[in-house]
Image (tube, helix red, strand yellow):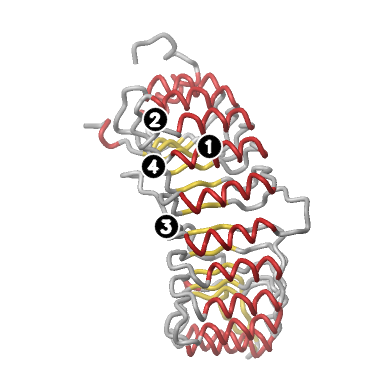
Amino acid sequence: EREREIYRFQISGNVRQVQRLSDDDVLALCKCLQHNKCVTGLDLRYNNITNEGVEHLAKLLQEKSSLSCLDLMFNDIQANGAQVLASSLQGNSTLLSLRLSGNKIGRGGGLELASMLQENCALQELEVADCDLDTSSIIALIIMLKKNKALCSVDISRPQLFVSQEEWAVHCSKMLAVNSSLMELHLGRMGMTDTGIEQLTEGLGRNNSLRYLDLCSNRVTRDGAFHLAMMLKQNRALEILDLSSNQIGDGGAGYLSKAITCPRSTLKELSVCRNNITSEGLLLLAQAVKSSSTLTHMYIWGNHLEDPVCQAFKELISSGRLHPEQTDVSPYEVDGHVFLAEVFQSLRKPVYNIDCNGTDVPTKTSEFELLLCHIQRNQFFGSSI
């Protein structure tokens, strides 16, 4: 009965009480899980797992494992490890979520994962942000999304793109025009300019499935915001747009405020944090929140929050039009003047979330500590488990 309660096994290395796992520890863990049908999620973030450890995990996946979620973010996996993992997933039908962000798998690893997506029809979530992917591997992954009908969430943020041409954006636009399964797409820190946004919005205007678009930390200005605003008037699916850490300014805020109040707009959440917007643009956005029938979340911190803006957002919050938990500012008064303080809240992440059929294994229970102690001392080697 106790075993049936375990669903998601968490040994992330950024937890203070847990020693980071090595490849030998992963081998011991895989031996423990060989015949286990209760553990459906494995969280191994922030450990010291290399290509050798990935080979053990790949064998586990090939042995008809019950794993549906595998999180390997920020380990030390290289291209060869990604190749081994991709090969094991070509015929796998159980794994739904794979997170590899922060592993320097590079061009070779990206191409191997793209090739895997030709055969795999089960994977629904793929995270390969900050993996040193180059232009060719990014384009390969995007092209595979034209044919792959299973993936619902993809994160390819912060690749290593050393060319000024945004050819990948053209492919992404064509993919979005025909893809009907993707619900969440993260394109943060891609170096995207207004030209790339213009290309991207052509496909987004014909897309009916994408709900969350992350464009944070790019080089989008007023003109890019104009193209996004035109797209929002056509697109009937997009609900969340992250434009934080760009440079849309007052002009871009004006374009977006008009799109928000458009009767056809379905946008519910918008982040324009750190966009060099002054009172002119922020007041337009505040009025758009008041007039919109769909927008419920607005994030504005990091712009020029002058007296009129502080007063406008105080009224939005006090009237109940903007819930305190659905914005990143909170009003307060000093000597009769209204100011806004930062509240550490942000857009919902993620919108699409794989259910591993349970909750995390408690990290402080005696059973967990005992098991982890055995694994780290390699006492399971040669056992019949």
**Closest to the observer, 279 or 235:** 235
258 vs 207: above or below: below
Disc 1 designates what residue? 72
**Closest to the observer, 240 or 29:** 240
Disc 2 designates what residue? 368
Which comes sooner in the sequence, label 4 or label 2?
4
63 vs 127: above or below: above
Element assignment for label 4: loop
Classify residue 99 as left or right of residue 32: right
Which comes sooner in the sequence, label 4 or label 1?
1
Identify the amino acid type marked 2.
Phe
Residue at the top extreme of this rendering = 382
Disc 4 designates what residue? 360
Disc 3 designates what residue? 181
Residue in view at x 62 percent, y 88 percent: 283
Per the rendering, the mark at residue 25 is none
Residue in view at x 56 percent, y 61 percent: 174
